[in-house]
Amino acid sequence: MRLVTGQGFWSPLVWLALAAGVALLAWAFWFRGRRTYKAGTEQDMPFLSGEQVPEGAHVGGQHLYWGFVEGLRPFVDRVQAFHTGFLGDYMTWLVVLLAVALLVVMLT
């Protein structure tokens, strides 16, 4: 079976075979993996940048991503003015940007 689209053709059976091949390859990698995990040992403890996390501690995003924020400081300072925390504002930006993208696609 082939679907002719005007831009060429594609065969669903070929894509199905490729998907099955990728799934088989992923399963082979998983099957050959190491089986050394032991529940209830140190392997269950949280790991944060090489440091042990104290019991009940909370690490916020501003600490975890400090290096990224410092590296992008000029951009973050400009964008932070638009960050209100109100979901309606974010949805408005999403709708406006989608409308602009739709206009660009339709006019080109």
Image (cartoon, helix red, strand yellow):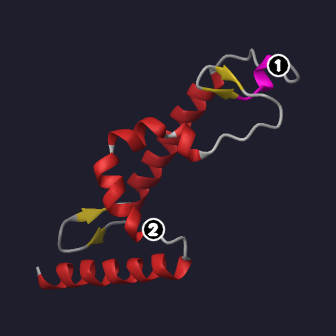
Residue 47 percent across, percent down from the top left: 68, 26
Residue 15 percent across, percent down from the top left: 41, 54
At mark 1, the secondary structure is loop
At mark 2, the secondary structure is loop
| Side of 99 relative to 31 (left or right) | left
Query: Image quarter for residue 2?
Result: bottom left
| Identity, as a three-letter code, of the amino acid under mark 2 | His
Q: Distance between the Cα atoms at labels 1 and 2?
A: 44 Å
Number of numbered markers: 2
Query: Where 93 falls versus 71 (above or below)?
Result: below
**Which of these two is toward me, 78 or 16?**
78
Label 1, on which residue?
38
**Which of these two is toward me, 36 or 30?**
36
Residue at the spot x=54%, y=45% of the render?
62
Q: Sequence-wise, which precedes: disc 1 or disc 2?
A: 1
Residue 23 percent across, percent down from the top left: 54, 41
Query: Where 76 falls versus 97 (above or below)?
Result: above
Q: Answer whether residue 43 is magenta in the image.
A: yes
Label 2, on which residue?
83
**Which of these two is toward me, 12 or 90?**
90
Residue at the spot x=40%, y=77% of the render?
94
Count neighbours of disc 1 (C-alpha within 10 A) and say few if under 14, some if 14 to 19, many if 20 or more.
few
